[in-house]
Amino acid sequence: MTRIEKNNKLVCMSSTLSLLRLYCVAPDEDAMFNPSIFFYFRFAIISILGSVPMIGSFTHMVHTIMSGEYNRVAGDITYISSYLTSYIAVWAFIIKLNRVAEIHIFLADIETFGKPQDFDRNNNNFNKYSKINYVFVEFMVWTSVSGSNIFQTKNCQEENLKFNLTEVCGLATYTWLPFDIDYSPVKEIYLMFQIFGVHLLYVVCGFMAWQVFEITQHIIIRMRDVKYVMFKALNQKDPLKRKNQLHFAIRYHNALFGLVDRVNEIFGPFMFTHMVVTSIIMGTGIYMFLHSNSLSSMFVFIGWLWGLCMVCFSGQRLQNESSELAVAVYDLPWYDCDQELKKDVLFVLHRCQEFQVLNAEAFGIMDNEMFLGVLKLTYSYITLLGNV
């Protein structure tokens, strides 16, 4: 990646950055390269407070298995998996904020490689879509909370009597703790911590999936600009100008390779855990909805499916665009250039054979094939749970 001055204004994805700051996941713009200790300390405290629902679901799963009750184990697995994945995604992002700032500054820089065509229009559109996505994620989270056990106290109490259970009714998720919390105001306070944790983790994890999508779309805009720059270069009549413009286009293309590497470095752990556990989350979520009428689990399924769609769709578009770039360069009149420029173009064509992809670490690449694979595995989990 080319060296870019740190004082450039982050004009790209400004809506997303503002929302991340609202949830204390990103520092102020002037501190992106060097977040303060207070920023990390603050988010560590928020993470600890937000871990209440995950800890409660884990202890409940252990307790109900050890007691032989096996009550709502599938639901516990759904929530534990989704919370844990959200934590990994957020902390992988937090500890690499310097890299995140580099990506934002590169995409905002219109001096080094110029401003892509329709840059302002596309940037404004993505800022608008970011807000729409945020509203959608908030709707899904609060609908999931509304469909949770909070408003199923009566059914919970009837199940306790019928099956001789000791579940704490009126909480967002089933919880077991080594001390009694089933009295006011302790239960209500615990419930507030549950809602805080669910809201924080799910919304921020939604931001992670959206960032992969949004950054990828900006990279694709730059790739199209590279095609335009190469077209101008190879159609230039003056040999010296043609050489200089082609070398400029090659530097531009190489910089985009470095940019994709940064994206995979930052979001690779998120995409890896996303792929490993998404099928578990969605499978157990559908199973809970079918067998327990759990609306909360159903909306968890929809939320993770939406995130999966965004990431895999982005990866597929990135592959398609990089392959189209190779075809576009090959179709240009490079064969009329002198021998030195022909070697440069062949070098570009060779680099274009390495399709730029979104990597889920060692798990594979994010594309349509991965999307279908996760859906197939989800169906397998639903079948497996149905036969247990």
Image (tube, helix red, strand yellow):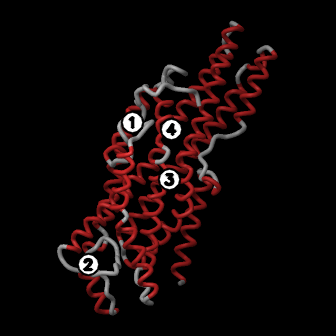
Disc nearer the start of the sequence (2/4): 2
Q: Amino acid at mark 4?
A: Gln
Among numbered discs 4 and 1, the one appearing first in the sequence? 1
Task: List the residue tagged with mark 1.
Answer: 31
The residue type indicated by label 3 comes to Cys
Dot 1 or dot 3: first in sequence order is 1
Using residue 180 as the reference point, say whether residue 8 is left or right of it. right
Q: Secondary structure at mark 2?
A: loop
Q: Which mark is residue 181?
A: 2
Question: The residue under label 2 is which amino acid type?
Answer: Ile
Please, which residue is most extreme toward the top here?
238
Distance between the alpha carbons at the discs numbered 4 and 1: 25 Å
Which residue is rendered at x = 60% and y = 30% of the image? 255
In the image, is residue 283 above or below residue 196? below
Q: Are marks 1 and 2 in contact (CB under 8 Å)?
A: no
Residue 24 in percent (x, y) is at 34, 47
Would residue 129 be seen by someone viewing this image from the given angle?
Answer: no
Any mark on residue 217, and which?
Answer: 4
Q: Earlier in the sequence, mark 1 or mark 2?
A: 1
* Dot 2 or dot 3, earlier in sequence: 2
Q: Secondary structure at mark 1?
A: helix
Q: Nearer the viewer, mark 4 or mark 1?
A: 1
Closest to the observer, 42 or 207: 42
Q: CA distance from mark 4 to mark 3?
A: 14 Å
User: Which residue is the site of mark 3?
Assistant: 309
- Within-10-Å neighbours for mark 1: few <14, some 14–19, many 20+: some
Q: Are marks 2 and 4 in contact (CB under 8 Å)?
A: no
| Label 1 vs label 3, nearer the camera | 1
> Crowdedness of circle 3 by 10 Å Cα count: few (<14), some, many (20+)?
some
Left or right? Give the position of 154 relative to 205: left
